Image (cartoon, rainbow, N blue to C red):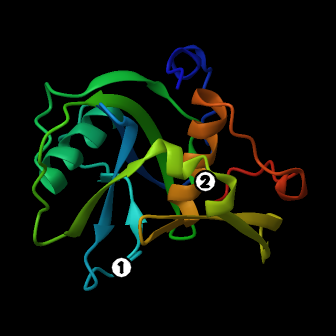
Amino acid sequence: MDLGAVADHDPRPVDHEAREAAVLVPVVDRASGPHLLFIKRADHLGEHAGQMSFPGGGREPEDEDLLATALREADEEVGLDPPDPAVVGRLDDILTVTDYAVRPFVATVPDREYEPNDGEVAEIAVLPLSGLVDTDNHDYERRNHPEYGEVVVHYFHVGGYTVWGATARILVQFLELATDWTVPPAAQGDDSPFA
């Protein structure tokens, strides 16, 4: 894994009248290799209930900027103290079906036990990068979106979890920058910010 490519990336912002949000892509370095920390959202939440995601959420008025949003949400959802993440860089902003413009920040975080916030997070999953880049664990489908036309939806099946939707879209760019994983040729061609 090469996080230098993430640090050097010039992220594409979204120019859209959408609600602002931010997520943290937490990289955990373990003896067995790098891992990524995901959360499984609680089933009772109104938007994206039960789905896998990176820690994050909507910008609040008290947030100085979107990085502050990502750090605050990561602290609230998994108990990641704001000084702990070492931010490496940003990925491209994406739009979600729930009309959020999401800004992803990549950071290394300590390898320790994280506690899920019972109100928002059902589970924390720290998944190995080796499983995420295994092409046998990746699938995709094409869907029609009323504004952007045909879009590609990616699925990553690792450790009994399925990462898809906006989180998978963020993951795809992270993997393409930080590893030698590439989107299969048949799944290429989708250049919209929609996820």
Judge left or right: residue 159 versus residue 151.
left
SS under mark 1: loop
In the rendering, at what x and y percent does residue 173 appear?
63, 40
Q: Residue at x 37, y 53 (%)?
A: 54
Q: Which residue is mark 1?
A: 49
Q: Residue at x 52, y 26 (%)?
A: 1
Specify few, some or many for label 2: CA neighbours under 10 Å numbering under 14, 14-19, or 20 or more: many
Decide which of tag 1 and tag 2 comes sooner along the chain: 1
SS under mark 2: helix
**Quadrant of res 155:** bottom right
**Quadrant of res 86:** top left
Q: Which residue is mark 2?
A: 169
Specify few, some or many for label 1: CA neighbours under 10 Å numbering under 14, 14-19, or 20 or more: some
Which amino acid, by three-letter code, is at mark 1? Ala
In the rendering, at what x and y percent does residue 188 appear?
85, 51
Q: Name the mark on residue 145.
A: none
Q: Residue at x 18, y 42 (%)?
A: 72
Judge left or right: residue 106 versus residue 79.
right
Which amino acid, by three-letter code, is at mark 2? Arg
Indicate whether 166 appears above or below 68. below
Out of 57 and 31, give the one closest to the viewer: 31
Residue farthest bottom in this picture: 44
